Amino acid sequence: MKKLRNEKPELSKKSSFYITKYRYYELKNFCLQYPDWKKALEQVNGWESSSHEVSGIIRGSLPESSTERQAMIRAYYSMHIDIIDRCVAKLEPAIAPYVLRGVTEEVCYDALRANGCPCCRKTYYKFYHYFFWLLSKERQ
């Protein structure tokens, strides 16, 4: 995994946004699936889902109906996307889209700044860590 410059996987325990290093890595890997979930959600329409395509998504016995399987798949991807979107929505609106790109695409601050991020590095990483703290609470 590419380590971003100035990325601190573990903040001081005195920080109000403290989460353990391993929890941070778990959440980071969760976020990196976001583009895949968005793509899968777009593709699910008109998609004839078979049992092998949903084995990791649906627990228990699979519905016989293709429509039911598609609905379950849509719900699965939508739920995961919504978790991240809810946390991003709690951030400063001007910075939120940049944090979203940073956490879901591993775009570093310097690249975000070059593409219009309106804040300094310190402020960006404050919101970045706040996002992961919110996500940790959402995913308890």
Image (cartoon, grey):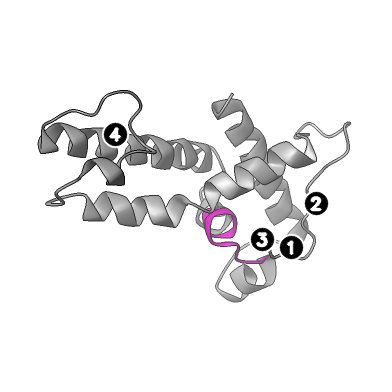
| Element class at badge 2 | loop
Q: Disc 2 to disc 4, how far (Cα)?
A: 33 Å
- In the image, residue 123 sits, relative to residue 118, either above or below, namely above
| Element class at badge 4 | helix
Instruction: Find disc 1 in the rendering and name its residue.
Output: 3
For badge 3, the amino acid type reads: Cys
Pointer 2 local density, CA inside 10 Å: few below 14, some 14–19, many at least 20: few
* Residue at 20% from the left image edge and 35% from the top image edge: 69
For badge 4, the amino acid type reads: Ala
| Element class at badge 1 | loop
- The quarter of the picture where the C terminus appears is top right
Q: Disc 1 to disc 4, how far (Cα)?
A: 32 Å
Queried whether the magenta region covers residue 2, the answer comes back as: no
For badge 2, the amino acid type reads: Lys
Which residues make up the magenta segment? 100-108
- Contact (Cβ within 8 Å) of mark 2 with mark 1: no
The main secondary structure of the magenta stretch is helix
What mark, if any, has residue 8 been given in the picture?
A: 2
- From the viewer's side, name the closer residue of 64 and 12: 64
For badge 1, the amino acid type reads: Lys
Q: Disc 2 to disc 3, how far (Cα)?
A: 18 Å
What mark, if any, has residue 63 been given in the picture?
A: none
Task: Give percent across and percent down for residue 84.
Answer: 48, 41
Dot placed on the residue nearer the N-terminal end, 2 or 1: 1
Task: Give percent across and percent down for residue 79.
Answer: 37, 34
Q: Closer to the camera: disc 2 or disc 4?
A: 4
- Contact (Cβ within 8 Å) of mark 2 with mark 4: no
Q: Disc 3 to disc 4, how far (Cα)?
A: 35 Å
Q: Closer to the camera: disc 2 or disc 3?
A: 2
Instruction: Find disc 4 in the rendering and name its residue.
Output: 75
